[in-house]
Image: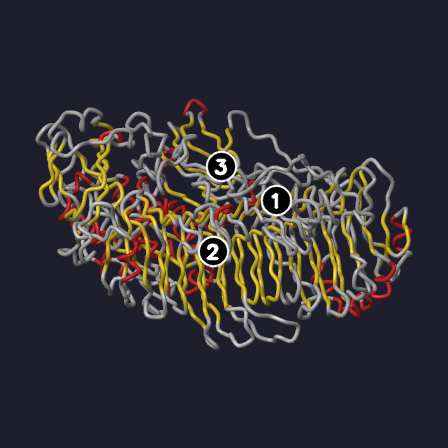
Amino acid sequence: MAVMKHYHRYFLMSLFSFFYYLGAFAQCLPAPGAVAANAHTIYYAGGSCTFYDSLCNPLLTVPPSEAIWSCAPAKARWALVNPLSGGYYEFPNYTNQTQQIDVRAYLQPMWQSDTIFNELVLLTGINSSARLMFRPSQILSIKNFDGSKTFTEGIDYTIDGNNITQLSNKISETYAAQAGSGLWNTQHSSWTNITYIPDRSDWGGNGLFGFRGDQLPNTMAKLQQQQPLVIQALGMSLTAGLNVSGFAGDPNNFTPNAPYMHSYIELFGEALRRHFGTPVTVYNSSCGGKTAAWADQYCQAMVNPNQPDLVIIDMGMNDIWGTSNSSFKTSIQNCIQKIKAGCPQAEFILLGNMLPDITGTGSPANGASKMYGFLEQLKSLESPGVICFDMTTASDTIYRRKGAIHCTANALHPNDYLARWYAQGLSALFITGDPVPNTGKTYYVNTSGSNGDGLSIATAWTTLSKVNQAVLLPGDTVLFEGGKTFTGNIELDQNDGNDPNRPVYFSSYGIGKAIIKTTVQNKCGFQATNTQGITLRNLEFQGPGPGNQAGKDGVLFYTTLPTGYLSNIYIEEVIVSNFGYCGIRFYSDYSPNVKAGFKDVVIDRCEVFQCRENGIVTIGYDDQNTTSYQHYNIQVKNTRVHHITGYASNQHKGSGIVLSQADSVLIERCEVFETGLGNTACGGPGGIWVYSANNVTIQFCESHHNSSGGAGGCDGLGFDLDGGTSNSVIQYCYSHDNDGPGFLLGNFWGARPWKNNVVRYNISINDARTNNSPVTLFTAPGTVWEELDFYHNTVYVSPSAANNSPQFSAFQMTDFGNSMNGVACFNNIFQTTGGIPLLNIPEVFTPQKPAFFGNLYWSSGAPFSLRYGVLCNSLEQFRNAGTLCEKIGSLAVGLEADPLLQAIQSPAPTLFPYPNDSLGIARLPVNSPCVNGGLNLPNIFGLWPGEQDFWGTTIPQNGGYDVGAFEYKTGPIVGVNQFEQSASSKISVIHNPSND
């Protein structure tokens, strides 16, 4: 809630302490011979090892008996071996190679996905053979280890059932294996990748995996609420990733090679981030050669300082040589108790590990029975917040169908294939919302079928007309051949699906996305009318071109019903382009009689571009007297919208994401750019905005280079809470280089009341290139506009020859309507260059007392200048211009100083798809006056500012709040340079925590 109503609290203060932190960053000189304890497990060639924190305080000393293989404890900064001749050797180190995997495909559960991607087999020479996990109904590709060579049936191999036999030397020409560390190690270049459509008619193993999130309620709640989640793994070399293809650090036995996959721990974290949209940090404190007794001894040093929410304990493979069941249980039980003592919120997954390959070199003959014994001990430890994940039985099942040699890189470690089962099985503990149905019929559409009943690859439909003629029942699936183009469109009505609990599912099978190409002017790519329970996944919709079509969407969900919600619509990993109206639109017919709309809509990991009108839209009938909303619970996540052209019209055209008539909206981790180029009207367009909406959260998004268009056009904004928006927030967003405001906050004629909104911890760099100001407030005459909390934002703007507005400043209230009540600005940075005024508050608004407390003002290279009814040429004049201008009672607050913003550049760098913590600009150095220079908003104003700054650093740090969007933390910022996943990721992975 806006805090203006709490102004009486300002005058209840008996004491206000306001200070700057100007001390130098604490440094220490490590002992001679010490090396940085990087975020990796460290192998020590000999001698004892002592770890130190960033202040050179000793954290842990590991004796020589353990230091041959040792793990850096949490918060370690330095490591020193004694004697120095012992040396250092770090692993895992995933090298500088990017994972060359399709993360989405690699995370699809192999027990239920429509396609098996890159199943590995080991073929070692002519006439060697291997078994696939399932009988293939269609082979899609067979390739070498890095995908650079494709093999041909009948020449290089034959398939008989689920057996493949090698015919030519071509398949095994890169096979290599070598002895090392008592094991026989299959090199990564040895594997053959097989992608196929599975026939699971003889499979009964789905019960091996399933949901257990209800037994880990704290973790499940954080995932569902999209709160930051910390996962800590404590395990062995298997857990660290030894023998997955991306693992480096053991060059005597393994050389990393394509596809450079990371460990199952990292893949598990990525699966949770992708499904729930939760920021996930993974600490992997795992070390080769260790037993459960080691975990018992060192778990507190490894785990507790990181305060994890979920701990994965993965021990046992090194215990099979002598640890008794009772000793194993005692060690794990002690470990849980020690971690719980320091981390009472922690929950646990106890991992019953894969069976060793008892026929392989280096495994004891009783290894399988030992592992099953350990599994029973782990199950006996299950309790509230503690569960056992059984990879023991799962691996046994997989080996029996496929053979252990095809699943393991040596007798003790999984290859990439089996490591994926670990990640997928762990993910299934929490993920239940996958809308993939398994109760209806599956129809295939391809280019080679007989156009028969569509129920098999051989009898597949070959035209979209067949899809449209069919009545699709709840739970049915339609799969299009990946990489192929199907001309036409898809149309559904109330007779198709219409059951939110059993959705109809459209996707691609095989390799790549199927393309639905619409070539006519009067058809959408996909249209569903008055129906619900629809999933579109992994498809591409192409239109005839925005210049060749008008009024037709790429994907349209449309209703004419008088009341009710149509629910459960998922659009995931879909590309939409070249349509004459919107890319994706949810449309309640624009009539006062149509009150129905859409509910529980998720648009995730999509891309929309080259559409004529707008990118992603929800809309319905609305006027100033409307009190309800047609749409409810709309989410747009991890999505990119760009090059939405707009066109000449008397109404604005060419916005990216614009949602209206919606209650409970989430827009997060999206990027919008290059929109509105053809617009010729005011009132829009813009990057990401909402109107006639309630309870909206826009967060972790980037909006940039959006255009106001040609002659007569205005706006081209970054973000906007527009007419009739209430109870909403924009936070942790990045706006730059837009023609119009970075943040527009206003109400238009005929809109509902605009009230009770928050804008916090955002960054605007050089917005307002042609009109308005980076932060622009406005209201139309005769409308209600009240209560804005604008705090901890960083606004930087330099001159633009194209912006001649007399109100051009860092922050403006627009003299249009004359009533904007409850404006409150706290702890923001307002920096201008070239003489641009800092604020522009017209005299008409000063009786409403817009409040400014604790902000920093800096006019670089020019005198201080702002308008608050009157021109103010100093901060002192500003304090005298109004009762709520940088003074609390008689106490002067606010700063006039250079904030020392780092690395500001023009144009500003693009951030998406990388996470906020990788943004290098607009940070503060330790000697910035902003550090600890902010007001304590909770204590003074009763205003809760959230839990983090723009970069994800917990607030406050060092005893006080900073000014602007950056909270300075002693030492590296959390997550910086730890982004190791694919470009779409937001998961921070730390193999062993080493930075304070």
Give the x, y percent position of residue 832: 78, 42
Please, is residue 36 above or below residue 664 in the view?
A: above
Q: Which residue is denoted by mark 2 in the rendering?
A: 552
Residue at 42 percent of width and 68 percent of height: 567
Front residue of this view, candidates 919 and 960: 919
**How was this image coloured?**
secondary structure
Give the x, y percent position of residue 296: 36, 50
Q: Is residue 3 left or right of residue 222?
A: right
- Whether residue 412 is visible here, answered yes or no, is yes
Give the x, y percent position of residue 305: 50, 49
As helix, strand or loop, the secondary structure at mark 1 comes to: loop
- Under mark 3, the amino acid is Phe
Q: Which residue is denoted by mark 3 in the rendering?
A: 51
Residue at 68 percent of width and 42 percent of height: 765
Please, is residue 253 above or below residue 26 in the view?
A: above
Please, is residue 956 above or below residue 318 in the view?
A: below
Of mark 3 and mark 1, the one earlier in the sequence is 3
Q: Is residue 706 left or right of residue 81?
A: right
Front residue of this view, candidates 41 and 569: 569
As helix, strand or loop, the secondary structure at mark 3 comes to: strand
Q: Identify the image quadrant of the N terminus.
A: bottom right
Residues at marks 1 and 2, CA–CA distance in whole angstroms: 20 Å
Res. 892 image quadrant: bottom right
Task: Give residue 677's mark.
Answer: 1
Mark 3 vs mark 1, foreground winner is: 1
